[in-house]
Amino acid sequence: MKKKFATLAAIGLLCALVTGCGGGGGGSSGSSDDSPSAPTSNPQGFWSGTTSDGVGINLIVLDTGETYGYYAARTSNGFDGALLGDVAFSNNQLSGSWLNFPFTSQSVHSGSYTGNFVAQDRLALQFPTGVTYSASYNVGYDDPPTPISTVAGNYSSGIAAIGWKGFASSELLPKPASAVVSASGAITFSPMQRCIASGTIKPRASGKNIYDAVINLQGSGCYMAFYSSVTLRGIALYVPGAGTSGALLIEARDDAKTGGLFFLAGK
């Protein structure tokens, strides 16, 4: 049985994880139909699984090959880090790379992997260290996106982290954050570690259950935006029913693929 994207609460934060923070169980995303649409020829979708050394990873792969993710060890009570990268694929083989934002550290690391997949079914990755990752497809990706008018609202008691490869900084350690989303998709964040952030979210042209996010950063706490603004592009994921009225996850990176932002909060 293929699972739906699920939600759990952990240490006061909303974890939009199918397997839960650190690999626990999960519930339904709200749709009653567990049947996926016709298989695609690429690995796009929501993927949830665990590595051979016990780290739970949730991946979001877009039709373009852009990849976003977040992870937690089984012994963790919350998020341990975020992933932003790209994957290339041919037939059922793939290879990719990403930036790893470990929230217990103060620096961003590069990583790579190879693997194979069966579209809308299963994904298997292997890392240079020998660690492997096995994941299952989550059919919530094929649901229509929630209207922006429903996503709109005040998101509080959340966390945000900003990091850049080559810059060791405490800004990568998650800090309290909040945001307001308007009915048109405009988003304004509370000041984050001397960094001002705002932008927009909108449904992707693919019609999948994911949004495009464009976030502009400016301020001394943004590093790359110290002298001018930096535009980040990525995804937003809305999980209805998480917490009280829903949770919003945003991951976005700069065009040079050297850094980015992670945001999670409930409303």
Image (cartoon, rainbow, N blue to C red):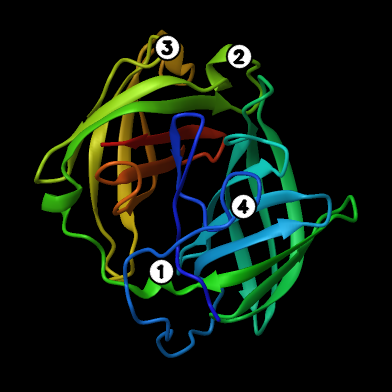
**Please, which residue is most extreme toward the bottom here?**
38
Badge 1 density bin: few <14, some 14–19, many ≥20, Cα 10 Å: many
Q: Amino acid at mark 2?
A: Ser
Circle 1 sits on which residue? Answer: 141
Q: Earlier in the sequence, mark 2 or mark 3?
A: 2
Residue at figure coordinates x 27%, y 41% from the top left: 244
Give the residue pinned by disc 3.
193
Q: Answer with mark 4 or mark 2, whichever residue precedes in sequence.
A: 4
3 or 4: mark nearer the eye: 4
Q: CA distance from mark 1 to mark 3?
A: 33 Å
The reply to whether dot 2 and dot 3 touch (C-beta < 8 Å) is no
Q: Look at label 3 and name its amino acid.
A: Gln
CA separation in Å, label 4 and label 2: 31 Å
Q: Residues within 10 Å of mark 2 (few under 14, many from 20)?
A: some
> Which residue is drawn at the image coordinates 57% and 57% (left, top)?
25
- Residue designated by label 4: 24
Under mark 4, the amino acid is Gly
Q: Amino acid at mark 1?
A: Tyr
Question: Counting other residues with Cα less than 10 Å from the Cα at mark 4, is it few (<14), some (14-19), or many (20 or more)?
Answer: few
Location of the N terminus (image quadrant)? bottom right
Above-or-below relation of 153 to 223:
below
Q: Nearer the viewer, mark 1 or mark 2?
A: 1
Give me the residue at 29% from left, 62% from top. 204
Give the answer, above or below, for where 9 lies relative to 237: above
N-terminal of the two: label 3 or label 4? Answer: 4
What is the quadrant of residue 111 in the picture? top right
Q: Secondary structure at mark 3?
A: loop
